[in-house]
């Protein structure tokens, strides 16, 4: 049975395949939070300004608040919930802890996904501060002045 | 030993894994959505409102208008209750209003099953207005014929004057030079990444539970009780993790409304989750200030007299009102205590969004004017900016003549010396002489600050701590002090670990505040928490330590003086040998059938001192005149915050403050149409707070003093770093170009006007 305005989608979320019937108007942010309980995905503006809802779609950094959930059909989604495995933080998460890059923490999951995508793109290459800044310019933080985040990114690229 | 160590923050892993739960993450299934109907004009009165069509929309639960809410006005400022009626906050708020005082004022509220329905219903509400001329500029507001924005208030929320030191008028007469200046600061916004959100439900016939992103849970409970005339025992406020506040959540904004709604809707859960646009329009901002400063100075560089006249704009409602100008004005007495000083301030209502508490509470405005004026005085005399300040600033043992208290710890001079050395000030000064001409120029700037460590004696300073020993020898700590991202829970854990000689990892601070169970504390504001809570933590930890050692005596038969705690073990002080570990002791205290009990300690303590803190910014900039652009080459803040409990977290506070200061200096302002009161940029795209690309490396350093009135020698640090970047940058622009930029922000638009006026660029013909 099909219901008008709803569609079935299948996607991989943190390495597990899921099939859902969703309201076609829903953003990926809404589906991740409300249907799948992935509460790390934060809403700070709802219009793609702040980056708190950043997730990876096929390893590309995306503001999930302005990405329709139906577009995720057949794709691979990653959120911060999938980054710590077997009780061990990812190298990026560990670097954020070690460098004091976390204050209120509301922007942190989005930042960690931005750094994760950046790290994977760098393939261990040396990067400049400017490259780090540019790669994280879509994520706003009001607590840290970005200083310790920069150190955390540097450390996680090196590790 | 945990104090002074860069231990990892207690909640860092919860946050990097996304497991830390914020208000929105805790919503109950089926929570209804409430959304405000906001005015589209800045000043007027609702003539008619028609909600019939909206009410009939499927999915709408209820609509309430100004006709449906209680008539008792309440104050929203997150201050401790004042038993002195003179110091009571202005009570000028209703839950909904018929009288429109700013564009965005709350006229009605729709409750619906979801956001989409609520938004559709809002569009169906029909309102007609009686419009009045918006009052926005001080000149218009103070006009005798101006309409009263709040009936009976003459548009002045508060006014006061003080003087200290010698006779100000005589000192001006005796001064070799008198320098005058006029300064303006913009309205800026906190922009915490988590918007305001609260929800409420009932768990009994008459019990309301409010979960809210707030800095002040205990104050919220009291104000909700007042606003709705209900007993405090019927209200429970829970504060989970909060995504930043910076003062904007030191105000009771959504909580009385969600409590009202759940009461009206038979206990159904109802949330208000403001959109970013609403949050930037309808919560709080920093008060814009208009400041006139007069400084008397002698040829030898001694400043002898100062007069300040301040107009502060609080916007449509008082909120923290005149307390901002009052608190800001009072801090100068600990920075330049030996000058004869007179201060006069007025706070005005205006038909613009509401101003309230924001990081450093009036000081960024006052110290900006003060440190610009100080720079102008130094330049008039021709003395180096640092030397001039060293001559005039506070020293340990100076009397703060306004508070009548001696300054017991003061590292102001050492801060200046450290900053000067870092900046290589003298060499750069010489080198930059060659960059004072042409389109691209370089300059250096400095500015000093003093601030307080709490609100005493204006308000009570009370903190509570409860510590309980667990069966395995670890401890649980509850404080009323509110973790809002600044790291206070970590600091508390370090203090407890220090006094009990326990490993830091064995101390668990209960994160969420819950007014049903958390000890009383007034919350996170005034940079007070680490200072005020330290006195309660020290006493509670010492009390528990005594109880632990007493129990060890019962178990071992040894005398009290023979035992101590070291690294989580009970030791014999004579041999340093371990007598038993904490778990053995604790298991005995819990489960021995005759002796002992659960070992706990609880202390509620009032701090009756208020330690001043000091600091400064040094900055090296390049000014590109044809581009109207200021580039920061190097910036450092140096602070005397007493003993630094955690150097990494302390550094983080300085970084965040400097960053916010740079934003206020260069780009941030709430843009308001001067005729209509329309707000142009209540979103994160058009309101320019710095991104990662806009912020240079921020350096920081500390001068550690020991403050005797604090439990661990520490003083305040959360707010002060935001204060001095704007005046330091302004002074550097003056150094580079010779132009005084006396209004904030120093955006390209502002620089264009002033560079043209001062002949740095040719006039642009239209």
Image (cartoon, rainbow, N blue to C red):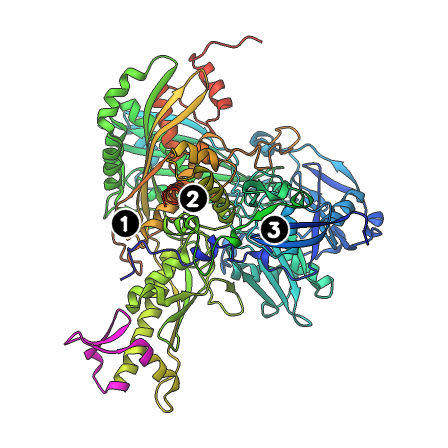
Mark 2 — residue? A144
Magenta part of the protein: which range?
B555-584
Mark 1 — residue? B407
Mark 3 — residue? A12
Q: Quadrant of residue B332?
A: top left
Mark 1–mark 2 distance (CA, rounded to whole Å):
31 Å
Q: Nearer the viewer, mark 3 or mark 2?
A: 3
Closest to the observer, B519 or A60: A60
Residue found at x 31% / y 58%: B710
Q: Nearer the viewer, mark 1 or mark 2?
A: 2
Q: Position of residue B114 (x, y in %)?
A: 72, 52
Please give left or right for residue B732 compared with residue B517 in the image. left
Mark 1–mark 3 distance (CA, rounded to whole Å):
62 Å
The answer to whether B236 is drawn above or below residue B355 in the figure is below
* Quadrant of the drawing holding the N terminus of chain B: bottom left
Q: Position of residue B116 (x, y in %)?
A: 74, 47
Which element type, helix, strand or loop, lies under badge 1? loop
């Amino acid at each position: 049975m099909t219901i008008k305005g709803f569609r079935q989608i299948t996607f991989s979320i943190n390495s597990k395949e899921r099939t859902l019937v969703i309201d076609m108007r829903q953003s990926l942010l809404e589906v991740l939070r409300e249907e799948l309980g992935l509460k790390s995905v934060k809403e700070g503006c709802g219009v793609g300004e702040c980056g708190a809802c950043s997730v990876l779609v096929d390893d590309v950094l995306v503001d999930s608040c302005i990405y329709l959930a139906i577009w995720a059909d057949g794709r691979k989604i990653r959120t911060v919930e999938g980054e710590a495995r077997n009780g061990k933080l990812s190298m990026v998460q560990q670097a954020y802890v070690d460098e004091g890059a976390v204050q209120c923490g509301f922007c942190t999951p989005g930042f960690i996904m931005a750094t994760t995508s950046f790290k994977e793109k760098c393939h261990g290459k040396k990067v400049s501060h400017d490259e780090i800044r540019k790669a994280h310019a879509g994520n706003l933080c009001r607590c840290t002045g970005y200083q310790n985040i920069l150190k955390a990114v540097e450390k996680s690229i090196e590790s | 030993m945990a104090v002074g160590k860069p231990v990892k923050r207690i909640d860092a892993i919860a946050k990097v894994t996304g497991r830390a739960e914020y208000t929105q993450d805790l919503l109950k299934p089926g929570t209804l959505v409430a959304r405000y109907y906001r005015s589209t004009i800045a000043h007027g009165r609702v003539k008619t409102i028609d909600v019939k069509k909206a009410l009939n929309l499927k999915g709408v639960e209820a609509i309430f208008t100004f006709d449906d809410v209680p008539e008792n006005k309440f104050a929203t400022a997150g201050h401790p209750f004042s038993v002195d009626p003179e110091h009571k906050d202005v009570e000028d708020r209703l839950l909904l209003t018929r009288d429109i005082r700013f564009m965005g004022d709350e006229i009605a509220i729709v409750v619906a099953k979801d956001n989409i329905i609520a938004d559709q219903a809002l569009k169906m509400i029909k309102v007609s207005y009686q419009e009045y001329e918006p009052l926005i500029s001080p000149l218009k507001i103070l006009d005798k014929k101006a309409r009263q924005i709040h009936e009976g208030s003459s548009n002045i929320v508060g006014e006061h004057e003080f003087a200290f030191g010698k006779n100000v008028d005589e000192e001006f007469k005796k001064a070799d030079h008198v320098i005058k200046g006029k300064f303006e600061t913009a309205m800026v916004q906190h922009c915490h990444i988590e918007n305001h959100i609260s929800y409420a439900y009932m768990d009994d016939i008459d019990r309301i539970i409010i979960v809210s992103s707030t800095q002040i849970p205990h104050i919220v409970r009291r104000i909700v009780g007042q606003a709705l005339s209900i007993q405090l025992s019927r209200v429970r406020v829970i504060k989970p993790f909060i995504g930043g506040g910076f003062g904007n959540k030191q105000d009771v904004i959504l909580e009385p409304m969600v409590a009202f709604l759940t009461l009206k809707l038979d206990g159904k859960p109802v949330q208000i989750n403001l959109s970013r646009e609403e949050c930037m329009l309808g919560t709080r901002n920093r008060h814009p200030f208009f400041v006139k400063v007069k400084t008397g100075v002698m040829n030898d560089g001694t400043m002898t007299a100062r007069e300040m006249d301040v107009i502060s704009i609080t916007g449509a409602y008082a909120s923290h009102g005149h307390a901002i100008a009052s608190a800001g004005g009072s801090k100068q007495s600990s920075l330049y205590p030996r000058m004869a000083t007179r201060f006069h301030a007025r706070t005005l209502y205006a038909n613009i969004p509401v101003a309230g508490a924001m990081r450093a509470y009036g000081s960024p405005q006052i110290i900006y004017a003060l440190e610009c004026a100080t720079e102008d005085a130094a330049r008039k005399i021709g003395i180096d900016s640092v030397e001039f300040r060293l001559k005039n600033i506070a020293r340990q043992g100076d009397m703060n003549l306004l508070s009548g208290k001696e300054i017991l710890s003061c590292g102001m001079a050492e801060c200046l010396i450290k900053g000067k050395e870092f900046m290589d000030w003298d060499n750069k000064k010489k080198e930059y002489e060659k960059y004072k001409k042409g389109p691209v120029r370089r300059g250096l700037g400095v500015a000093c600050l003093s601030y307080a460590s709490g609100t005493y004696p204006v308000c009570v300073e009370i903190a509570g701590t409860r510590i309980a020993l667990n069966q395995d020898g670890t401890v649980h700590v509850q404080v009323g002090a509110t973790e809002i991202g600044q790291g206070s829970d970590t600091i508390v854990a370090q203090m407890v670990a220090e006094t009990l000689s326990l490993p830091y990892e064995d101390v668990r601070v209960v994160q969420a505040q819950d007014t049903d169970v958390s000890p009383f504390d007034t919350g996170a504001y005034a940079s007070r928490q680490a200072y005020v809570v330290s006195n309660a933590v020290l006493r509670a930890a010492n009390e528990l330590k005594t109880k632990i050692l007493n129990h060890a005596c019962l178990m071992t038969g040894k005398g009290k003086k023979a035992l101590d705690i070291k690294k989580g073990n009970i030791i014999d002080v004579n041999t340093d040998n371990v007598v038993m570990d904490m778990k053995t002791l604790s298991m005995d205290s819990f489960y021995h059938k005759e002796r002992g009990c659960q070992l706990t300690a609880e202390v509620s303590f009032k701090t009756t001192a208020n330690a001043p803190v000091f600091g400064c910014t040094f900055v090296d900039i390049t000014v590109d005149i044809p581009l109207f652009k200021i580039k920061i080459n190097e910036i450092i803040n140096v602070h005397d915050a007493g003993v630094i409990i955690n150097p990494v977290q302390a550094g983080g506070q300085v970084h965040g403050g400097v960053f916010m200061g740079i934003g206020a200096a260069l780009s941030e302002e709430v843009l308001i149409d001067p005729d209509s009161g329309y707000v142009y940029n209540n979103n994160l795209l058009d309101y320019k707070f710095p991104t990662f690309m806009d912020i240079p490396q921020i350096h920081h350093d500390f001068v550690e003093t020991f403050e005797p009135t604090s439990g661990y020698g520490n003083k305040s640090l959360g707010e002060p770093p935001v204060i001095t970047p704007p005046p330091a940058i302004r002074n550097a622009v003056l150094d580079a170009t010779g132009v005084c930029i006396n209004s904030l922000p120093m955006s390209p638009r502002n620089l264009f006007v002033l560079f043209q006026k001062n002949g740095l660029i040719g006039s642009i013909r239209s």
